[in-house]
Amino acid sequence: MARLNVNPTRMELSSLKKKLASAQRGHKLLKDKRDELMRQFMNLIKENKQLRSEVEAGITEANRYMAVAGSVMQRETLETALMLPKQEVELEVSEKNVMSVYIPVFSPKYRTGDADDIYSYGTAFTSVDLDGAILALSEIFPKMIRLAEIEKACQLMADEIEKTRRRVNALEHIMIPDYQETIKYITMKLSENERSTTTSLMKVKDMVLNQSHNFT
Amino acid sequence: MSEMCKTAVIGDSASVSGFAALGLSVFRETEAEKISKLIHRLAANGFGVIYITEPAAALADEAIKKYRSRKLPAIVLIPAIDGNTGEGMRGLHKAVEKAVGSDILN
């Protein structure tokens, strides 16, 4: 622990005491913030993991259909079928404040009224596997949006937790002990000064008495 | 506050073509440099969510890291047509490690 480099005066002492009090209060608040963030993060990360495995399974299934479709159809036909999409999706972004971490919330808006209106081609020249692939993707899509949202939230919260933890540790292990030690040092120094003043006064008093009354 | 944003998918042609039908903007790109540039361009042009296949993401690590701590865009890894590399899950484990200090997810 390093003592702060300050003059041992009463003024410094009282300002240090104030700083210590606010550091302790800040430490308590930040610790609460860290704990609450951590609790929410743990809930989110569990959901995130679950969602991710679902989405990955869904996409893998769609990809399987796609691979089959790709092998039974000509590449050009496949590309043509998907060239002009009927559907268009936009996301409305709003934000949510979780312990002063701003996380995005997405809600999808489809161009056509029906979100299932996804087949941009006639069925004459395309394989049924392509339908399967697209259906599988459209089923998993709402989850993909939620995954994007929640994964971003987890990343942002992980950052914030790390930052908060550093602050808590800095306060707990460096700033507060430093303040305490400096306060102790100043208190000691001041009382030492006081004692030395008392002794010199006594000494002077003795000398004065000696001179005027010839006391022994 | 609410605004509209678009959604993009980046990856090799076979993996991402299907998403076109859902109304997502599809970008068929497999070269490292082009992918990084594309990510920066999309981020600057109001794309809120970018899905990227794991092999494509591996090529543009720097660009993805840059947007990790920003609010938007959210870059999400998805498996490509030739299988799941588990990179997406690893990202999750990394976040836990960052937050908790050790990987307690199992």
Image: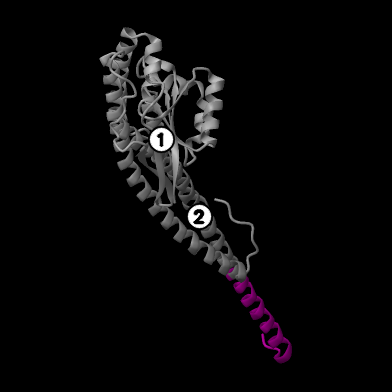
Q: Residue drawn 56% across and 67% down?
A: A187
* Residue at 49% over, 49% down: A167
Nearest the eye: A15 or B24? B24
Q: Secondary structure at mark 1?
A: helix
User: Quick one: A216 or A19, which is closer to the camera?
Assistant: A19
Residue annotated with mark 1:
B95
Q: Position of B31 compared to A72: left or right?
A: right
Return the x and y of residue B98 as percentages of the image width and height.
43, 37
Say left or right for B26 vs A45: right
Q: Amino acid at mark 1?
A: Ala
| Secondary structure that dominates the magenta span | helix
Quickly name the residue at label 2: A177
Calculate the distance from the C-alpha at mark 2 to the C-alpha at mark 1: 31 Å
Residue type of the residue flagged with mark 2: Pro
Residue depicted at x 30% and y 30%: A117
- Read off the chain for label 1: B
| Residue B100 visible in the current orientation | no
Rendered location of residue A44, percent (x, y)? 32, 41
Start-end of magenta stretch: A191-216
- Number of marks present in the image shown: 2
**Which mark lies nearer to you, 2 or 1?**
1
